[in-house]
Image: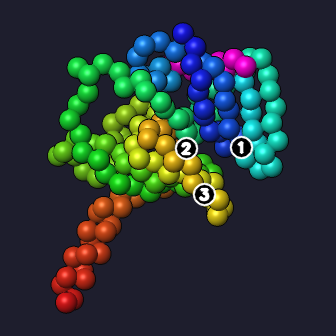
């Protein structure tokens, strides 16, 4: 079965149909070295020009973010987690959203636990340094190989709040 997939590389957005099975997209992209996009279009992040091709193979390592619609996978495989608001730099992108970790795990622990692509929810992302409105998605897969900075926002806010309370 082919489904429309949108993925963000360092210099373009790739759109096209990708052969997917019934499982979670994260499992499939973590296992595949190449994703084949059929009826693909590539849109430059620099100037917006588009190129269309019938078939395009993209190495998993070239992708920074993958938009996810549906495909929650087998409910029996889900673990209980808590959301953790984070801000990250992923290649040329500023990404804000929630990582999910075990309730007793350290902040940002999910970045070490998952394979190559880490799921995030309630996501906003944009090209770093640009004032354009962010892209908003319910779920995005983030390629850990391209994360250059990550910080937990809740811990930072809690620490700032503690200092203010102590001063007052």
Q: First in sequence: mark 1 or mark 2? A: 1
Q: Secondary structure at mark 3?
A: loop
Q: Which residue is mark 2?
A: 146
Q: Is the N terminus in the top left, top right, bottom left or bottom right quadrant?
A: top right
In the image, which residues are magenta? 31-39
State the residue in front, 149 or 139: 139
| In the image: residue 40, left or right of residue 154 | right
Q: Secondary structure at mark 1?
A: loop
Q: Residue at x 51, y 48 (%)?
A: 136
State the residue in front, 156 or 139: 139
Q: Residue furthest top?
A: 1
Q: Residue at x 79, y 22 (%)?
A: 53
Q: Residues within 10 Å of mark 2 (few under 14, many from 20)?
A: many
Q: Is residue 133 visible?
A: yes
Q: Secondary structure at mark 2?
A: helix
Main secondary structure found in the magenta portion: strand
Q: CA distance from mark 3 to mark 1?
A: 18 Å
Q: Is the C terminus in the top left, top right, bottom left or bottom right quadrant?
A: bottom left
Q: Which residue is mark 3?
A: 133
Above or below residue 165? Residue 145 is: above
Q: Which mark is residue 11?
A: 1
Q: CA distance from mark 1 to mark 2?
A: 13 Å
In which image quadrant can residue 15 be found?
Answer: top right
In which image quadrant can residue 42 be found?
Answer: top right
Q: Is residue 34 visible?
A: no
Q: Is residue 33 magenta?
A: yes
In which image quadrant can residue 60 be found?
Answer: top right
State the residue in front, 148 or 97: 97
Q: First in sequence: mark 3 or mark 1? A: 1
Residues tagged 3 and 1 counted as in contact (Cβ below 8 A) = no
Q: Residues within 10 Å of mark 3 (few under 14, many from 20)?
A: few
């Amino acid at each position: 079965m082919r489904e429309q997939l949108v993925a963000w590389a360092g210099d373009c957005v790739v759109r096209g149909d990708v052969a997917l099975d019934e499982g979670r997209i994260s499992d499939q992209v973590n296992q595949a070295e190449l994703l084949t996009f059929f009826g693909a279009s590539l849109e430059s992040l620099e100037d917006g020009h588009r190129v269309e091709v019938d078939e395009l193979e993209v190495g998993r390592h070239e992708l920074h973010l993958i938009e996810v619609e549906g495909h929650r996978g087998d409910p029996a495989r889900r673990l209980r987690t808590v959301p953790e608001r984070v801000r990250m730099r992923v290649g040329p992108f500023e990404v804000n959203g929630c990582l999910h970790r075990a309730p007793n795990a350290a902040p940002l622990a999910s970045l070490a636990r998952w394979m190559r692509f880490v799921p995030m929810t309630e996501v906003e992302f944009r090209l770093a340094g640009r004032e354009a409105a962010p892209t908003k998605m319910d779920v995005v897969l983030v390629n850990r190989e391209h994360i250059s900075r990550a910080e937990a926002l809740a811990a930072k806010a809690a620490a700032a709040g503690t200092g203010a309370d102590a001063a007052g």
